[in-house]
Image (cartoon, grey):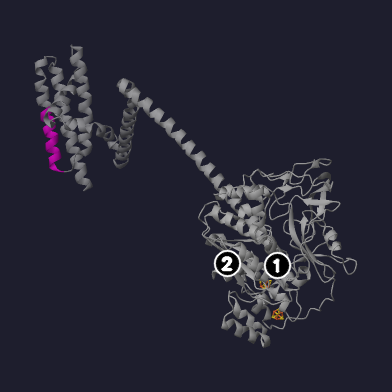
Amino acid sequence: MSTSLTQRLIQKIALVYPVAKRWLYKFHGGVFPKYNKSLSLRQPIRPQIIPDRLILPLQQQVGQQAELLVEVGSYVKKNQLIAQSHKDANKALVVPVHAPTSGFIEAIEDYALPHASGLKAMSIVIKPDHKEIAIDNVLKVNGKPPTTPHAIKEILFHAGIVGMGGAGFPSYAKLPKEKGKIHTLMINGAECEPFITCDDLLMQTKAHEIIQGAVMVAEALGADKLLCGIESNKPEAIKAMQVAAAETLVEIHTVQTVYPMGGQKQLIQELTGIEVPYKLHSVDLGLLMMNVATYAAIYDAVTFGNPVTSRLVTVSGLGLNSPFNIQALMGTPFAVLANAAQPKTEINYPLVMGGPMMGFQVQDNQVPVIKTTNCILANPPEPIEMQMPCIRCGECMDACPVNLLPQQMYWYSQSHEFEKVEKLNIADCIECGCCSYVCPSHIPLVQYYRHAKSEIKVMQEEAKAAELGRQRHEFRLARIEREKLERETRLQAKKDAVKKQVDDKLAQAGESSESAVAPSKKPSAAVAAARAAAARRLAKSKSASTTDSDDSDSGVHSAEAPAQEKIPAARRKAIEAAQKASEAAGTEKNPKTAAKNAAMAAAKKRALAKKQATESNTQASNDRANETAEATEQTAAAAEPTKAVDDATQDKRQKAIEAARKSASERQAKKQETN
Ligand code: SF4
Ligand code: SF4
């Protein structure tokens, strides 16, 4: 990038107003610390040091630890696989471990990790034999560049390559599976942290490997654009990279020297102008960025089949007389390297892994170099500035490269209001330390954010567990309800089946024999008859209760009234008279006729009683009585052909007629009296 007139003008303004330098790059904020990079650049890369013991943690990256493949006492060669990943490596983010040199396995036990937490992890301890017996091309590659994402991912996985800029994310997991998904591949050569110069020296010495490694990845992924960003304070590295990239598609860009230019999102914005949105990864936008050391390791693995067993490390600090860069074997204790740099005083203070801005003090100076160790810093402790209350100056907000509100996040973190801190997007904080660097009150803001992040993580896990519990409870209730419904449905189906079976059997029985069904109807007819009889008895009792005691027989007669009404009145009277006469005579010789006459007499008697009960006080009653008498006479006359009536019978009949007339007259008189 040529220095334009505008840039020169801004740089002059920056002499009196330092913050004017922020106008020279695209992302927000940033700081300009004292870099101290020249300390470790005074001498070339030092020859390799093989320590007495190499400590190799089974987990050296983001993810899970690998499984042991060796045991105590085993002899291993340089590059030999000593810990393998799980089967589902992509999910578990496991990376294999290889022996950095030949020697015997002295121990397999827990050792302190180079981590801010100071936690221990299972580690393999190798006692080198200093013979450097190696396995060549342990990855069994043919030297040809891979042409598919899958092929290059396989090599990266077996070589144990992780992000060597400090992130430690397994590189095979970072690459997409589909070809063409990445359109722009980027090389991160910014190296913005003070004191650290390993990438600078790597670019100066291995520019060809870096460029070729990037070209291999670009071809395998189908990326058609390659961009490399190098800070302007590395002129030799820029020159070497430009030479190496001359015949390739790689574009070398000199970027402004500002911290944290080496941050992935910041350098992407600087190189492409694209700001990666919140909660998105650069890969989602077709952009992929890796560190220069990672590309060099990829080249070594693809071309020579070598796994990652060493890396370039800066050993620097104000406490050292002779800082240097070294291709350190994995597992080399920090103290060994720091002591090799001629400490000014005994190193009885904690060393720092990384730079002064984002690095952390290790709990034990014997922790080993791992794949993410880019710098070992030996800065003697300085008097701690006294923390003062926040004066709300807003400097932290101006310096934040992610455009967060550090002051508010600090405020809520301090009062343990972590929900509010979360809403301020603390997850986007890259812990760059710019806010702490500029704070005039010397508030260790990043420490507050780290604590808040861990608390939020715990809260999220608890919320997740609670949500899981709620879902399980609801599923259980739903299952119980479903099983209940199923039981009821089954029971109903069973009932329906039984009912249908019975109906079918009845239908079959009805079709086969109606006579079998008929008897079943008989009870119904009998019941109906019984009910009719009961109704008649009820009517009879009612009628009896409404008539005089003298007319009690009329109730009996009323039941027979319908039959009587069907017989003509004159004929009925005649019949009754005849029957009565016959009864009185008792001379009927023919038994059949005699029975008939007796029945007729009884009927006549009942009809007569009824007539007497219902006869009105009108003259019509007398007339009817007379008519009855006449009818009796007629009937008697009609009965003459039977020749069963003698003279005595005639007399009796005449007497009966007269008695009837007399009775009618009496009733009439009686009624008239009543009226
Ligand atoms: S820089 Fe420090 S004093 Fe200023 S607002 Fe931020 S936290 Fe407060
Ligand atoms: S540490 Fe976080 S809050 Fe502070 S400046 Fe960096 S990104 Fe912003």
Three-letter code for the amino acid on which mark 1 is drawn? Ala
- Residue 551 vertical placement versus 672 (above, below): above
**Residue at the limit of the structure toward the top, as seen here:** 589
Find the magenta span and give its range. 618-631
Left or right, 431 with reference to 338:
left
Q: Assign the magenta stretch its main secondary structure.
A: helix
- The residue carrying mark 2 is 278
Q: Position of residue 493 (x, y in %)?
A: 45, 35
Three-letter code for the amino acid on which mark 2 is drawn? Tyr
**Quadrant the N terminus occupies:** bottom right
Residue in the picture at 52% in, 39% down: 487
Residue in the picture at 72% in, 83% down: 391
Mark 1 Cα within 10 Å, few/some/many (few <14, many 20+)?
Answer: many
Q: Quadrant of residue 348?
A: bottom right
Mark 2 Cα within 10 Å, few/some/many (few <14, many 20+)?
Answer: few
**Alpha carbon separation for disc pair 1 and 2:** 19 Å
Query: Does the magenta run of residues contain 268?
Result: no
- Residue placed most toward the observer, 177 or 484: 177
Foreground disc of the pair 1, 2: 2
Q: Position of residue 379 (x, y in %)?
A: 82, 70
- The residue carrying mark 1 is 452
Residue 224 visible? The answer is yes
Provide the secondary structure element on which disc 2 rests. loop
